[in-house]
């Protein structure tokens, strides 16, 4: 059973959306799905004041695809899209 590190890029609908709220609600869903507290959050400027929430987290490879988790995060108010930007096996 390998562990993988997944990175999500979560785009808000507009620059006026509360990113902290998106972060909090997304982390709740990620923790429920992955069953872990291993994560890192950052905010990345995109353009014209728009910023993306980047969340990197660790999960068991056996859980399979994150498609359902992505769709669940997209239902959060203020979220425009969720994209997996990186998936890699953890070492150690």
Image (cartoon, rainbow, N blue to C red):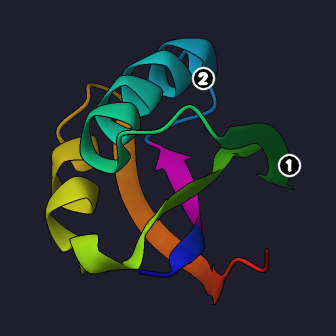
The label shown at residue 90 is: none
Tell me where residue 30 appears, x and y as whole percent: 38, 41
In the picture, the quarter occupied by the N terminus is: bottom left
Question: Is disc 2 surrounded by few (<14), some (14 to 19) or many (20+) residues within 10 Å?
Answer: some
Secondary structure type for disc 2: helix
Residue 77 found in image quarter: top left
Tell me where residue 61 appears, x and y as whole percent: 39, 78
Residue 36 higher or lower than 23, as above or below: below
From where the camera sits, is residue 29 visible? yes
Mark 2 or mark 1: which comes first in sequence? Answer: 2
Front position in the image: 45 or 21: 21
Residue 50 found in image quarter: top right
* Residue located at (58% from left, 60% from top): 9
Q: Which residue is mark 1?
A: 45
Residue 61 higher or lower than 57, as above or below: below
Tell me where residue 22 appears, x and y as whole percent: 47, 25
* Residue located at (54% from left, 73% from top): 3
Judge left or right: residue 34 versus residue 83.
Answer: left
Judge left or right: residue 78 versus residue 90.
Answer: left
> How many marks are shown on the rendered structure?
2
Please tell me whether residue 43 belongs to the stretch shown in magenta: no
Secondary structure type for disc 1: strand
Magenta residues?
6-12
Q: Which residue is mark 2?
A: 19
Front position in the image: 4 or 47: 4
* Residue located at (28% from left, 44% from top): 73
Q: Main secondary structure of the magenta part?
A: strand
Residue at mark 2 to residue at mark 1: CA–CA distance: 12 Å
Tell me where residue 86 appears, x and y as whole percent: 63, 81
Looking at the image, the residue that sits furthest to the bottom is 88
């Amino acid at each position: 059973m390998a562990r993988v590190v997944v990175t999500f890029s979560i785009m808000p609908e507009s620059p006026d959306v509360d990113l902290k709220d998106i972060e909090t609600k997304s982390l709740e869903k990620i923790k429920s799905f992955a069953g872990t507290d291993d994560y890192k959050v950052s905010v990345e400027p995109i353009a014209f004041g728009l910023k993306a929430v980047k969340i990197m987290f660790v999960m068991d490879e056996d859980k399979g695809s994150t498609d359902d988790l992505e769709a669940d995060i997209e239902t959060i108010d203020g979220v425009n899209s969720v994209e997996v930007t990186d998936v890699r096996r953890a070492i150690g």
